[in-house]
């Protein structure tokens, strides 16, 4: 089973700043089957990024994903008030189990 | 509108059973692989299991934590996904989400063929299961 470790656990930033979230896998993620989700309190997760770097439909271009192999990054270029939430990375593919990182909480400084 | 709506959650005693349902609308349910994901109170997301579609024999896969206790099924005629949970434990207490895996199509040799992306692009709002005596 691939273990995903996200860092930092909590990130405190101000609106307008740049956020960089990390996701490290215990072994290589095949075909860059790596997704990022945003979750706000009381809501379901929302897909942001798939294939490590492709934005999902309707996701603003201030969100970008990068990386391959075992190291992946989600970058939010200029934080908007609605971006403060918990972010999860997930590895997926044809062969489960699929695993999620433990999450990074992005909070307002 | 593409939508997934879970139901069937509630309070159940340890060792008991519960069946969750997920009603799909706004898309061709039968084409898609479907998953269950759960989230314990104050915790992160945990993948529970997946069912493939008819073209892939409705095969299922499960997380080790639920294998042998939980069963995923689907009824394409009713656009519905199910999660039968038996021998429930207190650690099964969570919000349970159903999620759709994206499928696309490509054209080749005079026909359209499915392309499975495997990521979960649509989620329901979840249903809460509490296992407690």
Image: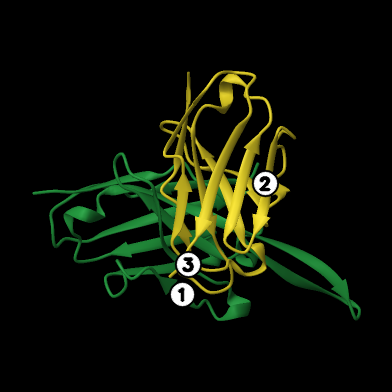
Chain colours: A yellow, B green
Picture coordinates of residue A38 (x, y %)? 54, 39
A11 shown above or below B95? above
B104 shown above or below A109? below
Measure the alpha-carbon separation of dots 1 and 2.
30 Å
- A28 left or right, relative to A3: right
Asked which secondary structure carries label 2, the reply is: strand
Say which mark, if any, is on residue B50. 3
Asked which secondary structure carries label 3, the reply is: strand
Picture coordinates of residue A18 (x, y %)? 63, 28
Q: Is residue B82 visible?
A: yes
Closer to the chain start, of discs 1 and 3, is 3
Q: Which residue sits at x=58%, y=56%?
A: A71
| Depth order, front residue of B81/A49 | A49
Q: Can residue B121 be seen in this view?
A: no
* Label 2 environment density (alpha carbons within 10 Å; few <14, some 14–19, many ≥20): many
- B20 left or right, relative to B118: left
Say which mark, if any, is on residue A65. 2
Tell me the residue that label 1 is attached to. B60
Q: Which of marks 2 and 3 is in front?
A: 2
Measure the alpha-carbon separation of dots 1 and 3.
6 Å
Q: Which residue sits at x=58%, y=66%?
A: A29
Name the outermost residue toward the right: B110
């Amino acid at each position: 089973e691939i273990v995903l470790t996200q860092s930092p656990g909590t990130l405190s930033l101000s609106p307008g700043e740049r956020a960089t979230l990390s996701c490290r896998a215990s072994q290589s993620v095949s075909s860059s089957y790596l997704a990022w989700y945003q979750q706000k309190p009381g809501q379901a997760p929302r897909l942001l990024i798939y294939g490590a770097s492709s934005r999902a439909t309707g996701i603003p271009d201030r969100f970008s994903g990068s990386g391959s192999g075992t190291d992946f990054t989600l970058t939010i270029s200029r934080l908007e008030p609605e971006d403060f939430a918990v972010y999860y990375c997930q590895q997926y593919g044809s062969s489960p189990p699929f695993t999620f990182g433990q999450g990074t909480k992005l909070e307002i400084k | 509108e593409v939508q997934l709506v879970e139901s069937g959650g509630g309070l159940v005693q340890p060792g008991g059973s519960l069946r969750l349902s997920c009603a799909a609308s706004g898309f061709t349910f039968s084409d898609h692989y479907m998953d269950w994901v759960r989230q314990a109170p104050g915790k992160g997301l945990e993948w529970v299991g997946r069912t493939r579609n008819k073209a892939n024999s409705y095969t299922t896969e499960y997380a080790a934590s639920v294998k042998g206790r939980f069963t995923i099924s689907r009824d394409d005629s009713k656009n519905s996904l199910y999660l039968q949970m038996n021998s429930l434990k207190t650690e099964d207490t969570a919000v349970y989400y159903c999620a759709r895996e994206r499928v696309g199509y490509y054209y080749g040799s005079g026909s359209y063929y499915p392309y499975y992306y495997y990521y979960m692009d649509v989620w329901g709002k979840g249903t809460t299961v509490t296992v407690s005596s």
